[in-house]
Image (cartoon, helix red, strand yellow):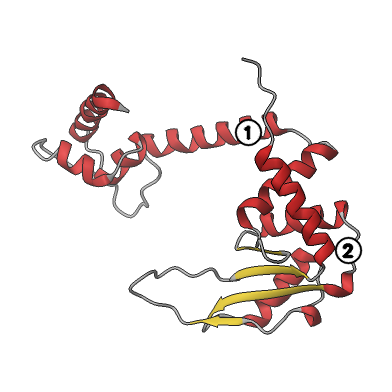
Amino acid sequence: MGYRGKLREREAARALRRRGETLLDIAEALGVAKSSVSLWVRDVEFVPRPRARGRRRGPNVLQRRKAAEIERLLAEGRERIGVLAEREFLVAGAALYAGEGAKDRLKFANTSPEMIGFFCRWLRYFFEVDESRLRGQIYLHEGLDIDAATAWWSEITGIPTIQFRHPYRAVADPSLRTTKHERGCAYVIYDCRATHRAVMGLVEALLTSQPAIPG
């Protein structure tokens, strides 16, 4: 960003602090670290905004502005992507597998139901899949409901629960993280070497292709 960009952010942070904004709100509004904001405004007198008694504080101006920007950019993204044509669908799936798929076998893993669902639709559309050879597996922390998670991922993947392998139960390490994915991480596995080679061929073609961009 450079020195000038940081200087503008510093002045904006100081102005917002004088108006009673919290360090967290300022950091989110400016897209910077809370520690940076704390350093920039440490000599600015802070008078918190009064809160009405008995009423829950609603989103402030900065939070509403951020939410509006996120919604605008989501709408813009949907408009730019539009409906995928068949070739675009093929390329998108290859890109997804390049980032999240295994290289030694056909296995795709993610915690996002949207990504898992997208991959399953892609695999079934472009390849002749023997449904009886599809397998699911779940990585789930101890203490979470494995039956509910299996049923949930089964519905998303279209893989019967009976075709899910024994789940991997993880013991949470509180020194590393405290949040847990309620439904865990799902794996979609298809033991077919020919299909795996075909998928990796698409990945290789994608990563070595030259985009036809003017200029």
Compared to residue 55, the image places residue 26 above or below, namely: above
Give the image location of residue 30, x and y in percent. Answer: 33, 34
Give the image location of residue 125, x and y in percent. Answer: 87, 52
The reply, left or right, for residue 121 in relation to residue 15 is right
The residue that label 2 is drawn on is 129
Judging depth in this view, the residue of 93 and 30 nearest the camera is: 93
The reply, left or right, for residue 71 in relation to residue 25 is right
The reply, left or right, for residue 75 in relation to residue 34 is right
Callout 1: 10 Å neighbours few (<14), some, many (20+)?
A: few
Q: Which numbered dot is residue 133? A: none
What is the distance, in whole Å, between disc 1 and disc 2 at their CAs? 32 Å
Judging depth in this view, the residue of 55 and 156 nearest the camera is: 156
Judging depth in this view, the residue of 192 and 117 nearest the camera is: 192
Residue in the picture at 11% in, 35% down: 44
Residue in the picture at 75% in, 64% down: 156
The disc, 1 or 2, on the residue closer to the chain's N-terminal end is 1
Residue in the picture at 82% in, 75% down: 160
The residue that label 1 is drawn on is 77
Report the amino acid beneath label 1. Gly
Element marked by disc 1? helix
Compared to residue 62, the image places residue 129 above or below, namely: below
Callout 2: 10 Å neighbours few (<14), some, many (20+)?
A: some
Q: Residue furthest top?
A: 215
Total tally of numbered discs in the picture: 2
Q: Which picture quadrant has residue 131? A: bottom right
State which quarter of the image contains the C terminus: top right
Q: Which picture quadrant has residue 205? A: top right
Give the image location of residue 104, x and y in percent. Answer: 67, 65
Report the amino acid beneath label 2. Val
Give the image location of residue 25, x and y in percent. Answer: 31, 42
Element marked by disc 2? loop
Judging depth in this view, the residue of 100 and 104 nearest the camera is: 104
